[in-house]
Image (tube, rainbow, N blue to C red):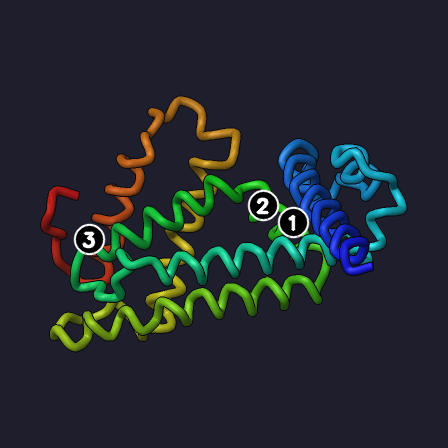
Amino acid sequence: MGVVTTSRKEKAAETEAALKEAAKRVFAERGYLNTKITDITREAGRAAGSFYNHFAGKEELLEALLADLSAAGDASAELPEHSPDFTDPAAVRWHIAAYWRFYRQNAATLVALRQAAMVSDDFARTLARFGAREQADVASHLAHIVRAGMRLPAEPETTIAMMFGMVDSFAQLWLVPPRPEGWRELSDDEAIDALTRFVYRGLTGRDPEGGY
């Protein structure tokens, strides 16, 4: 009996994972607003009714994807190379590089989250709370700058909001097609180094050392 139960749980987990991955592919192709639940189940190779064994609707599936993004961000912060000392440009670069890779990997989901927030006040609030938590996790990093006698461009919360907004908008510009016509293609390292210089100067008023 225990083997059967485990098998059912494993099968349910596999179906849920398949639906999530299928949703990301369909969101990338059609956009969240134009995607139907049957599009997701068809892409996943599952029966249409199976969707409702796991999610009440498309928005609940997107909330599950948001939870996955949050967990991935928490795991990244636990890596040994993570440093919260933003007086060190290498620490700033590490955070920007981590977000750049995160955005590249999850671009379809991130765009879908914004599209859902445009048509649902409840989801807009959910997404705003997620953003606030992510920013709060980084706010303590600015304390190193203040203790070093440097002056932030604004209050810590405002400074973090500006930094997040700029990095996120730049990532969206370059990592979500179509890219600006006629602009030179940037490698990931070029984009990350440019963002590092921009953010570090904005936070500290100084040029970063280390060749960024």
Amino acid type, callout 2: Val
Q: What residue is disc 2 on?
A: 111
Q: In the shown orientation, is residue 11 left or right of residue 52?
A: left
Front in this rendered view, residue 205 or 13: 13
Q: Secondary structure at mark 1?
A: helix
Image height of 157 relative to 8, above or below: below
Q: What residue is disc 1 on?
A: 115
Front in this rendered view, residue 57 or 165: 57
Tell us which disc is closer to us: 2 or 3: 3
Badge 3: residue crowd in 10 Å (few <14, some 14–19, many ≥20) = some
Q: Secondary structure at mark 2?
A: helix
Task: Classify the position of the C terminus by image quarter.
Answer: top left
Q: In the shown orientation, is residue 31 left or right of residue 100?
A: right
Q: Position of residue 28 (x, y in %)?
A: 63, 36
Tell us which disc is closer to us: 3 or 1: 3
Q: What residue is disc 3 on?
A: 90
Q: Quadrant of residue 123?
A: bottom right
Amino acid type, callout 1: Gln
User: Disc 2, disc 1: CB below 8 Å?
Assistant: yes
Q: Quadrant of residue 82?
A: bottom left
